[in-house]
Image: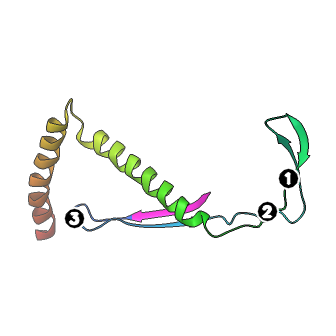
Amino acid sequence: MLSAITAQAGTATKSLLSLRAAMKPIATLMSPIESVDLSTMRKVDARRERSDFVAVPACAIIAESMLAWVIAEHLIIKFGGDSIEETKDNYNNYTKKLFGRININFKK
């Protein structure tokens, strides 16, 4: 489970997106806990499981996928459009105007 995520990037400078995430360690089961065998629906004791660090790479893939969805969602919110071409046009118009706005703001 991701417990903390921070992301930063410069949209004006087109810098790379940097992401830091933290993951809660998977607990080691030192004594069996009660569970259910789904094939028989009978109560059983779970096996003693040792936690492993191999979950971190899998979690990284999930976090990267979720980040892609969130970025895509916010691009659609910001630039909208009925087609990908219209969304691209909206983005291109925004970036053309952005450079002028940045120059004006820094001249003050």
Q: Is residue 6 magenta?
A: yes
> The residue under label 1 is which amino acid type?
Ala
Do the CB atoms of the residues marked 1 and 2 lie less than 8 Å apart?
Answer: yes
Does residue 12 sit above or below 73 in this rendering? Answer: below
Q: Which residue is mark 1?
A: 46
Percent position (x, y) of residue 60? 50, 62
Q: Residue at x 10, y 63 (%)?
A: 104
> How far apart in space, not on screen, are marks 1 and 2 (Cα)?
8 Å
Query: What residue is shown with label 2?
Result: 49
Q: Which of 55 and 10 lies nearest the eye of the viewer? A: 55
Give the residue type that dot 2 points to: Glu
- Residue 14 in which image quadrant: bottom left
Q: Residue at image x 16%, y 43%? A: 88
Earlier in the chain: of badge 2 and badge 3, it is 3
Q: Secondary structure at mark 2?
A: loop
Q: Check disc 3 and report its element: helix, strand or loop.
A: loop
The percent coordinates of residue 32 (x first, y second) are 89, 57
Q: Secondary structure at mark 1?
A: loop
Looking at the image, is mark 3 or mark 1 earlier in the sequence? 3
Q: Quadrant of the N terminus?
A: bottom right
Query: Which residue in the structure is indicated by mark 3?
Result: 14
Q: Is residue 94 left or right of residue 27?
A: left
Spatial separation of the CA atoms under disc 3 and disc 1: 50 Å
Q: Amino acid at mark 3?
A: Lys
Q: In the displayed image of the protein, which residue is found farthest to the front?
A: 39
| Residue 27, image x, y percentages | 75, 63
Q: Position of residue 9 (x, y in %)?
A: 32, 65
Horizontal relation, residue 107 to residue 10: left or right: left
Picture residue at 84% right of the left edge, 41% below the top: 36
